[in-house]
Amino acid sequence: MLLDADDQGTHGLVRDKQREETRKKLYHAAIEIFCRDGVANCRIEDIALKAEVSRAAFYFHFPSKDDVLLELLREAETPSLEAINALPPDAPLQSVFDALIQNTAAFWSAENRNRLLVDMFGVSMRRTTILADREAEVIRAAVSKRFEFAAGKGELSPVIPPEVLADFYLLNIFAAMASWCVQPIMPLADMLSGVTVLFMNGASNPAGSPFLKA
Amino acid sequence: MLLDADDQGTHGLVRDKQREETRKKLYHAAIEIFCRDGVANCRIEDIALKAEVSRAAFYFHFPSKDDVLLELLREAETPSLEAINALPPDAPLQSVFDALIQNTAAFWSAENRNRLLVDMFGVSMRRTTILADREAEVIRAAVSKRFEFAAGKGELSPVIPPEVLADFYLLNIFAAMASWCVQPIMPLADMLSGVTVLFMNGASNPAGSPFLKA
DNA sequence: ATTATCTATAGATCTATAGATAATGC
DNA sequence: ATTATCTATAGATCTATAGATAATGC
């Protein structure tokens, strides 16, 4: 509660605690102001005022607004990540999907967070190099690992590498959320389940003529 | 060449021509500076200098940088749109995909435009209300119409409305481009074809056990 | 005379950085 | 004494708007 795991040892305790408190105050103030005014419109000054620090203190902790949103993304991913990692290694892919969908939907359905989804998607696209650096992003690494296992059991199409499939799946989930938040016609979890079925089964009618047998 | 179709009639000719020229100069200068400095980093002043007008003239024509990128998106969509509209009403879905893929890949593979793809995707997400206002965006309307026809012939899954499928298809195409531009490991057209096959057939292995029979 | 297009510029906000303060390591 | 954290602030850039100019409609 007091310190992060990588802050132990001989480091200064008072200073670390103070820094983390300021950072947390700024983070929560920023999210609040983002929701109130919109990410693009809000003023850093208002964030600093709410956090009761100077405007420059914000820039000391966060190089830009984008970095706050990236931290929100990591916070949002944590419950899904823990739920997926708690599954046994041979868990069926469906249970991985369920863990991701339920935790993600619960986080983003709460309060008025959905106002931030589109901006966060933009940050995510700008900051992450898709198809590369998978290890740097824990949720991508976790889902990727499960997809690889499923591919090994022959559950996934052998045409496309499982890591690429995992990236496209997460991308679809994210895009679905971004579209859901502008018009929430159904519960988010239902929407994400629908996208999952579409992703796995494809858009073509299985009863109709098979499309493009690759 | 001189005027847009909606500018005929008794409107001032000299003024219209002058305005469109200034607008075009600003547009091309903006794209050039965006490519050179990045959309987020570039200064409006540099765009105005290159276009040889005042900085405020930029804001007169474009409320923000985003509006320039939106115009680039419309320009990029035009060849695809015309190719799709030139197809006969009963053209197979595959020819619609081909028209979109070839024209889109040709546009974005040229020069160093790919540097703008991620930013444009962000603008597109921010400005378009997915699942709504389909008519306002011509490319969505055109693809949607073709998907509806295909659904009528039983080629598409009956579970999801064809307009929604069309939106998700375009979203996947866009996301694939955004990921391609950070790591162009293959020709863009090949990547888009792969995404199309994945979209239609799904990620599950047809030889394996069918997934989630809805 | 009125209006559309564009310029000049005031005021707001951001970015970069020099300096203050207090915790830390020696 | 040194360093990390934060503040104060100068300079850069943006946003908003009053005003200049020349084309337009009557």
Image (tube, coloured by chain):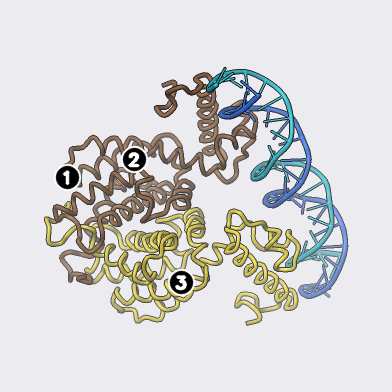
Chain colours: A yellow, B brown, C blue, D cyan
Q: Residue at x 63, y 68 (%)?
A: A27
Is residue B74 left or right of A41 when viewed as pictured?
Answer: left
User: Viewer-nearest of labels 1 and 3?
Assistant: 3
Q: Residues within 10 Å of mark 3 (few under 14, many from 20)?
A: some
Comes first in the chain, label 2 or label 1:
1
User: Viewer-nearest of labels 2 and 3?
Assistant: 3
Q: Residues within 10 Å of mark 1 (few under 14, many from 20)?
A: some
User: Viewer-nearest of labels 2 and 1?
Assistant: 1
Q: Residue at x 62, y 34 (%)?
A: B46
Viewer-proximal residue, A153 or A20? Answer: A20
Amino acid type for the residue under numbered disc 1? Pro
Given the image, what chain letter belongs to the residue carrying mark 1?
B
User: Callout 2: helix, strand or loop?
Assistant: helix
Kindly identify which numbered label has been placed on residue A109: 3
Per the image, the residue denoted by label 1 is B92
A135 is higher (above) or lower (below) than B197:
below
Amino acid type for the residue under numbered disc 2? Thr
Alpha-carbon distance for marks 2 and 3?
35 Å
A126 is higher (above) or lower (below) than A185:
above
Alpha-carbon distance for marks 2 and 1?
19 Å
